[in-house]
Structure formats: structure tokens, C-alpha cells
Image: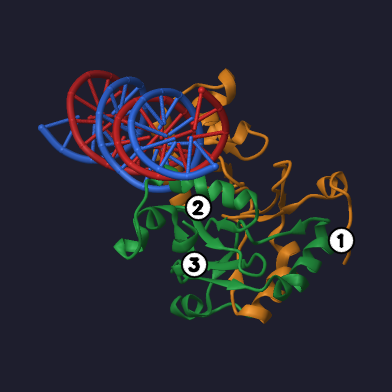
Chain colours: A orange, B green, C blue, D red
Amino acid sequence: VLETLFAAEGPVPAEAIAAGLGGRLPASDLASVYRNLETLEAVGLVSHVHLGHGPGLYALNHDGESEWLTCERCGDFRAVDPAALDEVRAAIHAAFGYRACFAHFPVVGLCPGCQSALGASSST
Amino acid sequence: VLETLFAAEGPVPAEAIAAGLGGRLPASDLASVYRNLETLEAVGLVSHVHLGHGPGLYALNHDGESEWLTCERCGDFRAVDPAALDEVRAAIHAAFGYRACFAHFPVVGLCPGCQSALGASSST
DNA sequence: ATACTTGCAAATGATTTGCCAGTGT
DNA sequence: ACACTGGCAAATCATTTGCAAGTAT
């Protein structure tokens, strides 16, 4: 499982891991994959993120957890360094007292491309 | 279904609507409830939010959609006026070009209570 | 022999779909 | 007669659990 996650380019669904990323790596049973992922998450080597509906996506924690942005229209997503969201976190903390984390559940919105794809109207 | 949503205090799972909020209102079949909710969402009267894992929660759009904050530790949540998140949205837009929306997927983090419950360490 | 890990199958929870009967126009 | 809505059962998708067989220590 670790080898497969290492070979993956980005976060992947458990099913893809079970399939060995489409046959390129040894396949295993989905149940074992979930069991291993659970263990690996518990020790902090792996984490998963929920991008919209659809299955959770798993990825290695190379240096630390990433946080995520995803587009609710086209489904695209990007990892961001947690530090890049510190200003956002500060604004949320100042307004509501919450300390936000976008590692497990991402920031959801419209990516620049989809903003223009719909008639670009709003400002700010 | 509308009547039930109107009687509900906050966002409720489809199952609670089907049960008539625990018997206080006429019960219906879960499938019908989902079908009606889908239609009501399509016409903009209702929206649902995904609070962490667990079922989606449905609520009326009284004056406009709310956006949500939820605590990943205690599961508590609160609705916020979208305007209150404009500063946050602006920070995200400035940094990444994304236009965030927290109506369907909330801001996830630690509420003030849970921050103290874990040894309050971090600042900002 | 004992502990850990797997594969496979069945269970769970949320949601969707198919279909048929009941109501309304 | 025809369109719409509801109930009920079965299907689907992601994930979990039980259990028996297999490998390792």
C-alpha cells in the first residue's frame, strides 16, 4: 500500500490502490487496503481528504499534511501549503473563534476557470 | 416535507424528515423524501450541507443560503451569514483565485470549546 | 503454537432507482 | 385516459466487519 501511494502522483481513491493503480503494481483486496490505510493514518504517514461527493482520496504525508482547494463545478483540486492558508485561518479565527483546518475537508468553491466559464460577474 | 423542514429547528437528516421529526408530523417514505428534497433544492427552496461524515442535513433557505462552520472534534456546527465570510472569501480569492463557498461544504475546524479542551497551545 | 495479515463474503449506512398502485384532472 | 406522487423493495456506492486460511516468529 505504501509503495502504491508512493507511486501515485496525487491523492487516489482506495479502489485505485486495491487495483494497484490500474495493474501497474500488485493488487490487493479492498478490505485490506482500507485496513492498512486506517493504520497508516493512525501513525500519521497517510491522510485522506474528501473532495466533494465520491470516495475519499488517500495520499502520503510527505513532509506534513497538505490542505486542499477543490472546485465544486469541475471537480479539479489542488494541494496548498498550510502556511498559505494562515491568513484565511486568522480571518476565521478572528470572526468566529474557530480554528479551521482544510486537510480533511477542503475549501470548496469555484476555480478561476469555472468562474469565467460561467459569466464572470461578481467582484472583490 | 416542507412543513417538516419548517418545523425543524435546524438542518436535519433526510431520515428525520421521513420519520416526521420523530412522530410529531406525518411520516413518509425515505425515497419520497429524497425525491422531494431533490426537487426543492432544484428550485432553490431547500439546501443541504455535509457536516463531516454522516448523512447530509437539509434545511429551508429562508432568506438566502447560510454558510456553515463545524467542529471536527465535537461535531457541533453553526450557521453564519454569508456576509460574515466575505473577508475570508476575499483572502482565498487573493491567494488562489478560487471563489469559496461554504454553503454545501462547511468550514471545518475546532470550535473554541474544543480548542481549550485540548491543551490550548497555538496562538494567532 | 501464537500473532499478524490477507482474501472473500456479508453487513452497514446513505442515497438512488424501478415499479406499481392511488390520486387528481 | 393521463400525468404526478407516494410507498415499497431492490440496487448502488463507499466503507466496515466477521471469519477462516496463510504466513511469519
Can residue B112 be seen in this snapshot? yes
Can residue A48 be seen in this snapshot? no
Q: Does the CB distance between marks 1 and 2 fall below 8 Å?
A: no
Q: Does the CB distance between marks 3 and 2 fall below 8 Å?
A: no
Figure check: B109 above or below A68: below
Q: Give the secondary structure at mark 2.
A: loop
Label 1 – label 3 distance at C-alpha: 31 Å
Q: Chain of mark 1?
A: A
User: Which residue in the protein does label 1 denote?
Assistant: A122
Could you tell me residue B62's position as x and y percent?
A: 61, 68
Could you tell me residue B93's position as x and y percent?
A: 82, 61
User: Which residue in the protein does label 2 denote?
Assistant: A44
Amino acid carrying mark 2 in the image: Gly
Same subunit, labels 1 and 3: the answer reads no
Q: Which of pointers 1 and 2 lies earlier in the amino acid sequence?
A: 2
- Residue for point 73% across, 74% down: B83
Q: Give the secondary structure at mark 1.
A: loop
Figure check: B18 above or below A19: below
Q: Give the secondary structure at mark 3.
A: helix
Same subunit, labels 3 and 2: the answer reads no
Could you tell me residue B119's position as x and y percent?
A: 47, 78
Q: In the picture, which quadrant includes the C terminus of chain B?
A: bottom right
Q: Chain of mark 3?
A: B
Amino acid carrying mark 3 in the image: Phe
What's the mark number on residue B1?
A: none
- Residue for point 50% across, 21% down: A26
Amino acid carrying mark 1 in the image: Ser
What's the mark number on residue B6?
A: 3
Viewer-side residue, B120 vs A88: A88
